[in-house]
Image (tube, rainbow, N blue to C red):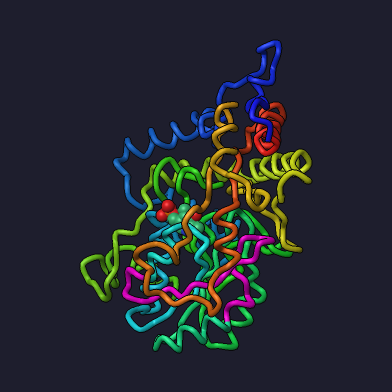
């Protein structure tokens, strides 16, 4: 690297006309302008009736979510984390139980397991789709049993917007008498062989955190299942384990409800979601055309579509990622690392077993991934700037 090489487009520009105004990493404002009148009308009605918790808007959202996912039931809940926690509670997961999950995921995935006194057992991921490697599942089961634990479930994560390999995961789960909880916090709206996320596992959890592909204006989440009995238990857990009436508590539960104001935002966002998914796919395709050959661009597993919760590239081995990010930032281009420190290296999981041989792909990815600005309203000019800034930062 030449020490005097220009490090930013601005420095490289002679005319000084290069745009270095920040590119938004996500844009929730443009979308808000599109749906504001409809949301406001709903909010006026709701607040006039002082109807804040559950109610018809939540029921309407649940009908629409179940239809979109192709499942018998959808249950709207308070957050993605609660959506993950509740099925584990419903199934009675606790001390001595092992739940297999990837380490290369957001903190909430193993956290809900550990919070119930059970133990997450970490499985490596595949570099081609960032998702749990089915080949690691049987070795991880051996590790769990060796540690004196009883494996009960597998929790795959659909990282960055495409589904994990549920065909392989469900097959292994069935062979070993385990159930499957899909962490679809990043993939609601995606499909596998034309089947929607939500219908790919026994029970699926998603998140409506504002930055997700389908986000509320606050916290929210949902559960999907075809299992009537499980649905009834989840519904009870959502309201403190209520029985036939609210003050009959037949089990332990939580305050897991979605509120009506968020439900009405989500109804309006769901109406434009298919169009936004198309726009996200166009953005991803443009990025890949601009960046192929410079970095490893994301790949879709055969049969998969993605909702592009993140557009994440893998930098060449040995790249000084911090320096690349700093050069991009100077050009007005933000980037993020999802996730810099895998969960198996985090303090709460110091004693958690992992797949024998460790998690080399997870460790390598954590050191090399870079997520670029991604939202449905990104312009071609902005994408060109993002791509140019990354390519120039790599060449510097
Ligand atoms: C966002 C996220 C969650 C948690 O969702 P919240 O709504 O923030 O509680 C869980 N798992 C993954 C993979 C996520 O990205």
Q: Which residues lie in the magenta part?
A: 114-137
Residue at 32% across, 35% down:
48
Q: Nearer the viewer, residue 54 or 201?
A: 201
Magenta span includes 151: no
Could you say which is closer to the camera, residue 251 or residue 168? 168
Q: Is residue 361 visible?
A: yes
* Between 268 and 282, the one nearer to me in the picture: 282
Q: Position of residue 108 (x, y in %)?
A: 42, 60
Is residue 132 located in the magenta-colored stretch of the structure? yes
Which x, y percent locates residue 162?
64, 58
Residue 73 seen anywhere in this rendered image of the structure: no
Determine whether, in the image, residue 61 is placed left or right of residue 239: right
Residue at the image point whose x is 42% and y is 71% from the top: 87
Give the vertical position of 96 relative to 293 (above or below): below
- Hey, which residue is sitting farthest left in the picture? 247
Among the 4 quarters of the image, the one containing residue 13? top right
Q: Which quadrant is the N terminus positioned in?
A: top right
Q: Is residue 339 above or below residue 92?
A: above
Image position of 69 with respect to 376: above or below:
below
Q: Is residue 281 above or below residue 138?
A: above
User: Which of the 4 image quadrants contains residue 68?
Assistant: bottom right
Along the viewing direction, whichever of 145 and 284 lies nearer the viewer:
145
Residue 144 appears at what percent x and percent y?
46, 83
The residue at the point 23 percent across, 72 percent down is 249
Quarter placement of the C terminus: top right
């Amino acid at each position: 690297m030449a020490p005097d090489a220009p490090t930013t487009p601005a420095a490289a520009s002679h005319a000084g006309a290069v745009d270095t105004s920040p590119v938004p990493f996500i844009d929730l404002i443009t979308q808000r302008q599109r749906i504001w009148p409809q949301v406001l009308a709903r909010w006026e009605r709701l607040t006039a009736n002082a109807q804040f918790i559950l109610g018809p808007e939540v029921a309407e959202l649940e009908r629409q979510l179940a239809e979109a996912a192709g499942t018998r039931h959808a249950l709207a809940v308070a957050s993605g984390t609660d959506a993950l926690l509740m099925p584990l509670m419903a199934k009675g997961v606790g001390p001595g139980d092992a739940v297999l999950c990837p380490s290369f995921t957001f903190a909430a995935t193993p956290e809900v397991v550990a919070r119930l006194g059970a133990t997450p057992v970490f499985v490596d991921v595949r570099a081609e789709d960032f998702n749990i490697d089915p080949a690691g599942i049987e070795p991880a089961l051996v590790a769990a049993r060796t540690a004196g634990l009883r494996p009960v479930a597998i929790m795959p994560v659909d990282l960055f917007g495409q589904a994990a390999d549920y065909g392989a995961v469900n097959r292994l789960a069935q062979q070993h008498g385990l159930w499957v909880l899909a962490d679809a916090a990043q993939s609601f709206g995606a499909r596998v062989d034309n089947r929607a996320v939500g219908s790919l596992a026994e029970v699926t959890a998603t998140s409506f955190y504002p930055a997700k592909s389908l986000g509320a204006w606050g916290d929210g989440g949902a559960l999907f299942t075809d299992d009537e009995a499980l649905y009834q238990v989840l519904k009870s857990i959502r309201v403190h384990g209520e029985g036939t009436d609210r003050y009959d508590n037949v089990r332990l539960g939580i305050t897991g409800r979605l509120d009506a104001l968020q439900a009405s935002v989500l109804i309006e966002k769901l109406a434009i979601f298919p169009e936004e998914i198309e726009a996200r796919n166009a953005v991803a395709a443009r990025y890949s055309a601009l960046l192929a050959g410079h970095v490893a661009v994301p790949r879709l597993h055969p049969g998969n579509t993605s909702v592009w919760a993140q557009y994440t590239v893998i930098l060449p081995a040995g790249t000084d990622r911090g320096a690349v990010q700093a050069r991009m930032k100077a050009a007005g281009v933000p980037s993020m690392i999802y996730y810099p420190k895998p969960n198996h290296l985090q303090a709460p999981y110091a004693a958690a077993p992992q797949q024998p041989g460790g998690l080399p792909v997870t460790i390598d990815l954590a050191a090399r991934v870079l997520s670029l600005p991604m939202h449905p309203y990104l312009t071609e000019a902005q994408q060109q700037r993002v791509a140019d800034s990354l390519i120039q930062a790599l060449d510097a």
